[in-house]
Image (cartoon, helix red, strand yellow):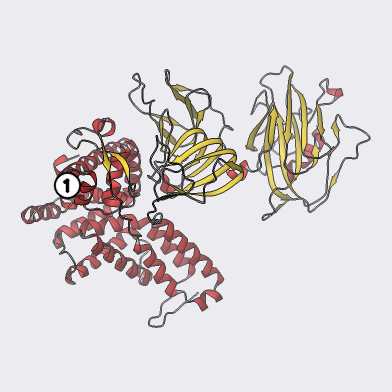
Amino acid sequence: GTLSMANESYSRSPEDVSRLALLWGKAQHSVSAYVHAAVRNHHDAEDVIQATVTYIAHHFEEYDPDRPFIAWAIGIARYRILDHRHQGRRQPLLLGDEALDSLTDAMARKADTADDRREALDHCMGRLKPEHRRVLAERYGSDKGREEIASDLGIKARSVTVLLRRVRTVLAECIDQRMKGSAS
Amino acid sequence: MNDKLVETCLAYLDGDLDEAELKDFADLLAESDEAADQLADLALDEQHYRQAPAGPKAAELPLADALAMPALDAAFNDGVPTIQYTTSSTAKPQSQYASALAYVIKQTFTPKRVAVLGTAAVVLLGLVITLTLISGPDETEQITDLPGVVSPSDEAPVTSRVVATLTAEHQARWDRRPGQDLYAGQRFTLRQGFAEVTTARGASVLIEAPSTVSFSENDNAVFLREGSLGITIGDNASGFIVDTPHTRVVDIGTSFGVSVVPGTDTTHVQVFEGEVSIAPPPDDNNTDRSRTLVANGAVEIGLPFGVRPAEFEPTRYERDIAIARLRPGLEGDAEWAGEVPSDIGFGQFESVKTRVHIEQAGLVLGRAIQADFGPGGTWPLDPEHEAPLIPAGTRVDVYLLHLDPPSTEDHEAESVIRFDRPILGVLGTEATLHATDSTLGLPGVLYPNPNIAGAKHSYKGVRGLDFTDTGFVDHAAVAADGRTITLSVNGSLIDQARVLVLARDQGSPTTN
C-alpha cells in the first residue's frame, strides 16, 4: 500500500515496515555501541540514536539492499554525531573527524562478528561471580556514576574504576580466547 | 590481546583521559585499525552491559577486592569479602530509540489507513512488539514489599525487577501461586503439573512438578533448588544459566534439560541440541575445570564422584507445554514419550516399557472411523461389545501406544493410562492400524506398514495387539467411564495400538 503523511509524501509498504524492523533489530546493538563510544554523554548519545533511527525510518527507501544495512545505519549515525557536534550539546565531541571515521570503519567491520562477540560475552559473563555482574549492571545498566556506586559500597570511586577495568579486561580476554577458539 | 591498548580504550570510554591523552588517543585511532577495532569491541561489550539488568535494591553484596584480581582465573574464581550494599538503584531509562522508530512508523500509518489496510495493521502490531522485544525488558518501578513473595536465604533477594513471565500452565498447583510477572529472586514451588516461563531474554523454561525455582536478577539465569526443567533457548538468550546446588550449567546451544534428582544429592543434565558448559560441584577438589556437554549427551554432577556420564533419555525432559498438556496420567510400565518420532518401526525404540506417544492433536476426522473397541470394551475383542463408530467431524487427539522389548524374548508390560477426557475408541488390530496410518498418524512418520509405498519397515504380522492365534495374548480394557485404559501386553516384536480421545483443544483444526 502507498501511504502519505500530511507534510511529506512517500511510499512504504507493510513489507518494508516489517523488513525495516528486522534490519533495525539486527543493527541496533552495533549502532548504539558506536554512538555511545563517540558521544560519551549518555543523554546526548540517546538523542543521537533517536535522531538516527528517525532518519532511517523516514529515508528507508534510500537504503540499497545490496549493501549491509548495519554499515548504512552506522554511516547515518556518523552524520547525526557530526550534527550533534555543531549543535553545542551537553558535552563536546571527544574525537576528531579522522578518529571518528576510523571508529566508523571499525564498527562496520565488526558488524559480521558482533553477534558472535555478544554470544561469547554472555558465556564469559556466565563465568563471572554474580557480584561482578551486578557492579557491571549498576554502572552501565543503571547508568550510575562511579561515585554513586562507590558511595553505595562504602569504598573509594577509584576502587570502583579499578574493579570495573579489571572485570572488563578479564572479559575482553575471555572473549578473545573464546572467539579464537571457535574460529580455529 | 594488547592489554595496554585495552586499558587506554577503557580509560577513554570511562572519560578518564585528560586533554593531552585524549589527543594522543584520537591520533592513535586515526592511525591504527587495531586501536579502532579494539575500541569498537569494547564499545560493543559496553552496550551489552548497558542492556543488562539493574542491581538489587538492597542486598548483601560481596565485592571483590579490586586489587586481588590479577588474572583470568582469579577473576572467575577468587573468594571475596562481603560488604553491605545500602542504597536503591536508579531505574534504567527505557530505551527510547526503538519506540522512536515505532512512533515514526505509527505516524506513517494513520488510523484510517490502518483500518483500510488490515494487513498493514497486523504488520505494524508485529513491528511494535518486535521493537519492544528489541529494546529489552521494561523496567518496573522499585517497590519495597512484594506480598506473598519468599526471599530464599541462599539465593538472590527478591527485587522489583521483572525477569520472566509465566506464559502457560497445565494442571499446575502451586504452594503460593506467582503472578504473571516473576521477579528476580522470587522463589516458587510447583507442586503439580507444568508451568512454562519465558525469560525477558526469550529463554523458554518448562518447569515440571515437583520443582522449586527462582529467577536471578540477571534476566538470563534460573536457580533450580529441586525438580526438573526443560529449556529451549531463543536467539537472544544465549548463555542462559541454570544454577543448582551442585553445578552451574551455561547454555552454548539451544535445548537442554536439568534436574535435581530427589534423594540423590545430584544434578542430571542432558543436552538435546547445541552444547552446555557444566561446572564441577563447588566442593569438588578433583575436578577443577568446567566441561562441555554436547547434544545427545547426559551427565550427573554431585559428590563424591564429581561429574560422571549418564544414559541419554530422549523423553526425560518435557520442553514443549503444548505436548506436556497432552500427557496422560501413567501408571505401571507405561512411559510418556511425547510426539511420535520420525521412525517408529521395529527396533527403533526398544524398551521394557510401553511408550505413549501423541500423534495428532485437535484433528478433525474427515470421515467416520470404526474403532475396534471403546468404553466398556476389551481386548481380545468381546463379540457382545458394540465397537464405536466415531463420526466424521469429531475433533480428536490421537495417541499411539508402542511396545518393542529389547530382545526377541517375550516380555510383559502392565500399564494404566488415564485421560482427563473421554476415550472415543481404540484401534488394536494390524489391519486397522495400517488403514489409518495415513489419516490418523503423523505425516512423514515411518510406520511398520508394508502398505505404504517405499516403506522402510515391511514386517507383517508384528504389529497391533496380539491375540490367541499368534501364540501371545495381550489384554486391554477401556473402563466404562471411558477415561482409563489398562494394558497387559506380551511383546516379542512390536505391539501397537492407536487410541482416539476427545480433543483437548478447540483451536484451529487440521483435517485428515
Judge whether residue A183 can be spotted in this image: no
Residue B116: quadrant of the picture = bottom right
Instruction: Between residue A87 and residue B55, name the one nearer to us.
Output: B55
Picture coordinates of residue B505, whole percent (x, y): 68, 51
Q: Residue at x 28, y 46 (%)?
A: B86
- Left/right placement of residue B445 relative to residue A135 reads right
State which quarter of the image contains the N terminus of chain B.
Answer: top left
Picture coordinates of residue B397, whole percent (x, y): 72, 45
Q: Secondary structure at mark 1?
A: helix
Which residue is farthest bottom? A6
Q: Residue at x 16, y 44 (%)?
A: A156
Q: Please give the count of numbered marks on the rendered protein.
A: 1
The answer to whether B381 is drawn above or below residue B51 in the figure is above
Instruction: Between residue B75 and residue A2, name the one nearer to us.
Output: B75
> Label 1 lies in what chain?
A
Judge whether residue B199 can be spotted in this image: yes
Instruction: Between residue B477 and residue B189, name the one nearer to us.
Output: B189
Per the image, the residue denoted by label 1 is A157
Residue type, label 1: Ala
Q: Residue at x 80, y 33 (%)?
A: B430
Residue B305: quadrant of the picture = top left
Instruction: Between residue B7 and residue B181, name the one nearer to us.
Output: B181
Q: Residue at x 62, y 42 (%)?
A: B323
Picture coordinates of residue B183, whole percent (x, y): 44, 48
Which residue is farthest right? B384
- Left/right placement of residue A118 relative to residue A98 reads right
Residue B290: quadrant of the picture = top left
Which residue is farthest left? B20
Picture coordinates of residue B331, whole percent (x, y): 70, 29
The answer to whether B428 is drawn above or below residue A40 in the figure is above
Answer few, some or many: residues within 10 Å of disc 1's Cα (few below 14, many 20 plus, some between 14 and 19). some
